[in-house]
Amino acid sequence: MALAFDEFGRPFVIIKEQDQKVRLRGLDAQKANIASGMAVSRILRTSLGPKGMDKMLQSPDGDVTTTNDGATILEQMDVDNQIAKLLVELSRSQDYEIGDGTTGVVVLAGALLEQAQKLLERGVHPIRVAEGYETASRIAVENLEKIAQRFDFGVNNIEPLVQTCMTTLSSKISECLEHLLWTLWKLRICVNRCKRSLAEISVKAVLAVADLERKDVNLDLIKVEGKVGGKLEDTELIYGILVDKEMSHPQMPKQIEDAKIAILTCPFEPPKPKTKHKMDIDTVEKFQTLRKQEQQYFNNMVQKCKGVGATLVICQWGFDDEANHLLMHRDLPAVRWVGSVELELIAIATGGRIVPRFEELTPEKLGKAGLVREKAFGTTKDRMLYVEHCANSRAVTIFIRGGSTPASCNKMMVEETKRSIHDALCVARNLIRNNSIVYGGGSSEISCSISVEAAADRYPGVEQYAIRAFADALDSVPMALAENSGLQPIETLSAVKSQQIKENNPYCGIDCNDAGTNDMRQQNVFETLIGKQQQILLATQVVKMILKIDDVISPSDF
């Protein structure tokens, strides 16, 4: 692209290879952008809510992912269009900031784009639409604060947190079990029990690492591990660290009490010269001397660990059979090839220090754990290492099991449960940061829609049309919930909205679970206030960005 001037001195732009470019301007560009965003939104619309459908995505390597988590679906999809990539980033931002509501934020953005298209076709300027949306989003956020409720919780009163996490898991675990459990009667027995137990595990894990005085939670201290096999009910919370390793020698003890752990990043092997070298061994005596020297190196290393009082060695690198044999004979259990992330978590949990050289090993740098044990699973050779009762119990592990046939379903179930647990952990963290909730089932969206519609009359200008369009877009979320639950969407939405207005009850929503009542307070369907506010604000900002694009220059398809 270059800038040139005509004979009258007026500037104009020269675009190189003009015939090979595709250019859309004005209303055509905006319509094309809106169509791209709506296409992505329609994909996720059927996955919204507890009865939402799953998507099966196959990677180029042949790996299959089955999920109804919006962020995961968009991450796995191969998206080429730049506007569609904006919605992928929107879902990722919601996942990063809140951890939940990734599907709803994209559905809301798609509805806002659809309403914006109708206004553009009527001749409303896109800037006016964007300004109206911004005004309406502020009204909706203020209304959410009015209808929000606060609840008290603590270490001894976790029921409110558990109920909120169950709402998050209801759209995840139930669907996962529906597709992966063997028979319908097993589904009826397991769904509610698994949902509650997983919610309790998530809440206890967050409270274990939370600083309630500062209202801060570091989710990096919570490790989520999964192992194929067993049942979903076997999922457990470990107040410590779980390492997918085993003792380096089969004859080493499998259980160590009051362990003093040396955490090493240096290998059990003789030092290697940094330059190229060559050694000629032409006699037995030279070989024996070399072997004794190597053995002396290993003896010194083991002695340094024993000398500081270590009863267990966890090493980032491997060691050869001679070192392994010597460790076993000197009664010093060892674990090798432990990843750097696990080493850091073990150091945090046990209060130890990661030691890069044997010379720096001191008793003060040893980690302490009440129990270190190796556990085998079933009849397989799978073994894992439990580091429990640590000096600093703020590092915890959620260990997920999953059982069904075939094995591929098993793996999908574990992975989907991991994603569900992540959402529940994020919701519990958000509640500790801000213990305000709004009620789910689309009740908050309907209440905001009524509030925005009423406020539109106060704005005399073109923005009034955009504000009313925003109210119509908010109705798309409860309508999608009703549609995915097999209800008549328009009739259900009209009935619930009229009930809210007649009873002045902002807690009436869509009865997706056929509980017999539209009052979400009785169904215990909660969502975090900051999560719902973030949904509205993020969706509005992305739609404003898309509406302000009026010129798209892209390379030709051929």
Image (cartoon, rainbow, N blue to C red):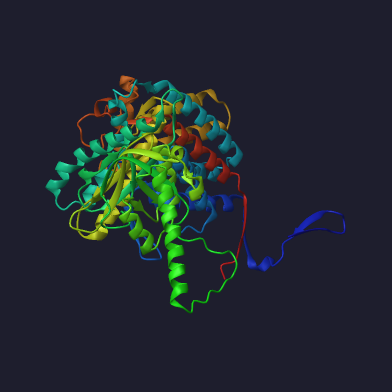
Q: Position of residue 335 (x, y in %)?
A: 35, 53
**Residue 21 or 6: which is nearer the viewer?**
21
Please state, as top left, top right, bottom left or bottom right, where the N terminus lies in the image. Answer: bottom right
Q: Is residue 142 visible?
A: yes
Residue located farthest toward the bottom when viewing the structure as drawn = 282
Rendered residue at 21%/60% (across/down) = 406
Rendered residue at 41%/56% (across/down) = 299
Q: In this view, does 319 lie to the left or right of 27?
A: left
**Residue 52 or 203: which is nearer the viewer?**
203
Q: Where is residue 170 in the image (x, y as percent from the top left)?
A: 28, 39
Residue located farthest toward the front when viewing the structure as drawn = 285
Q: Where is residue 551 in the image (x, y as percent from the top left)?
A: 63, 52
**Residue 366 or 514: which is nearer the viewer?**
366
Q: Where is residue 142 in the image (x, y as percent from the top left)?
A: 47, 24
Q: Is residue 290 left or right of residue 409?
A: right
Number of labelled discs?
Answer: 0
**Residue 522 or 443: which is nearer the viewer?**
522
Q: In this view, does 453 lie above or below 256?
A: above
Residue located farthest toward the left when viewing the structure as drawn = 185
The answer to which quarter of the image holds residue 473 is top left
Q: In this view, does 313 lie above or below 502?
A: below
